Amino acid sequence: MGNSREDLGNRGKRPLTREEKIKRRKAMEAKRKKRRKKRIVKLIFTIFLLLIFGGGIYAYSFISGLKTNTLGTGTAPASSSDPINILVLGMDIGDTDNQANKSIRRSDSIMVFNYNPNTKKAHLVSIPRDTLIEVDAYLDTGEYQRYWKMNAAYALGGEDEVITHVESLLDININYIVEIDYNAFRSIVDAIGGVEMTIEQDMYYDDEAQDLHINFKAGETVLLDGQKAEEFFRWRENNDGTGLANGDLDRIKNQQLFISKLIDKALSPSIIFKAPKILDAISENVDTNIPANELISLGMKVLRIGPSNIVMKTLQGEAEYIYGQSYIVADKEYNTDLINALNSGDSSSADNITSINRGDLKVLVLNGTKIDGLASSAKNKLISLGYTNIEVGNTTTAVSKSVIQSDDKDLRELIKSDIDIEKVDKISKSEYKDYDVVILLGDDYNLLN
């Protein structure tokens, strides 16, 4: 009556000891675990195959759906070691009554994406839309005009006209072009899941003709979906005329801040689950002449380099009035370092910069404005970064745009990385020759800091 199942199974045999029973149970449990492990491995392998199969379907769908036949034929780099340059145009609506008429659209945003396979780095360069270009063309009135703004180039001669001027400004060869209108922009941002931004200042603007209504409050943190992202991206001024002090240049800074957050999110591991929606948004809304397989290959390379190796820059120039119009006149001397980075991707400069001892440098900071204490404020910032030999003073003439002056390219890059001044030049006056670096603070420095 009191026999256990084990005892009955072992009738006629020696009864198992307690230790033997425990050992048998452990062996049986180990077999069950092994069987479960095999089932789990088979399940994971099946899921993996399904992901590959599903990814293949989406990749095929993406490749077949990408609009690669609308912008002519791109030109691949001559060598696999040469940089790839992609012109990215953010297009406005153009004719609000006939949006299908793309011939009169203007490029609201102009950027160049540069990837260098040698350094495994990428640059995203913004070109201000007010940048001066020279084109022999006529106004609708029949009047001849030679000087135009960069954002008019598309209306004057399409993609070819834009490419001509961008290549001249940056001394590069454009390989491919991507056009994104605001419908595409909204779709891509929505597919990614929106971007969270903290609003730095009040933004309120209404344009009934374009059905554009912007309303953000300073200090609020907002998850920008496609519609809200477009509003943030386009804003420059409020209904009452207040807004960004430096117009399009400050708007570019806002855009680059948004793009950096967008890139961070797009390159995060969790984005894999949103890949189908993102690929659909790109194939349905973006015009390009990049072969789809090349686009996927480039995308994988960018994924590997990560957000920290994507550098955002803006083409620099001086604001000038010509025949009553305000232009930004780009000077290649101001942009030497940027142009060199795009063309050669030489990383030796970065290595040289890291070896510089800030405490050994003799720095002169000059206030070129009427704002008291500006040079002292910059001095304190430099001291906090390790500079020890700093003199301050005032310029004899007013300075509108701050500039870093040094005869050493690496020193110019070091100061640029330490203080928020983009414009660089060689030392301009003989009385400054005893200094390694001269920093001239202009009106823009007070706005940036």
Image: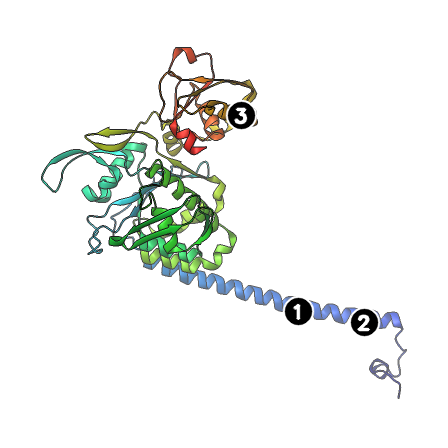
Report which residue position mark 2 lands on: 24
Question: Residue 386: x percent and y percent?
Answer: 57, 25
315, 398: nearer the viewer: 398
62, 109: nearer the viewer: 109
Dot 2: few (<14), some (14–19), or many (≥20) neighbours within 10 Å? few
Q: Is residue 194 above or below residue 39?
A: above
Name which residue type carries label 1: Arg
Q: Nearer the viewer, mark 3 or mark 2?
A: 3
Q: Residue 36: which disc?
A: 1
Residue 384 location, quadrant: top right
Q: Does residue 7 appear to the left or right of 307 in the view shown?
A: right
For marks 3 and 2 on the same chain, the one whose residue lies earlier in the sequence:
2
For marks 1 and 3 on the same chain, the one whose residue lies earlier in the sequence:
1
Q: CA distance from mark 3 to mark 2?
A: 76 Å
Q: Is residue 324 above or below residue 203?
A: above
Q: Residue at x 49, y 41 (%)?
A: 308
Question: Residue 419: x percent and y percent?
Answer: 47, 29
Q: Residue at x 39, y 11 (%)?
A: 430
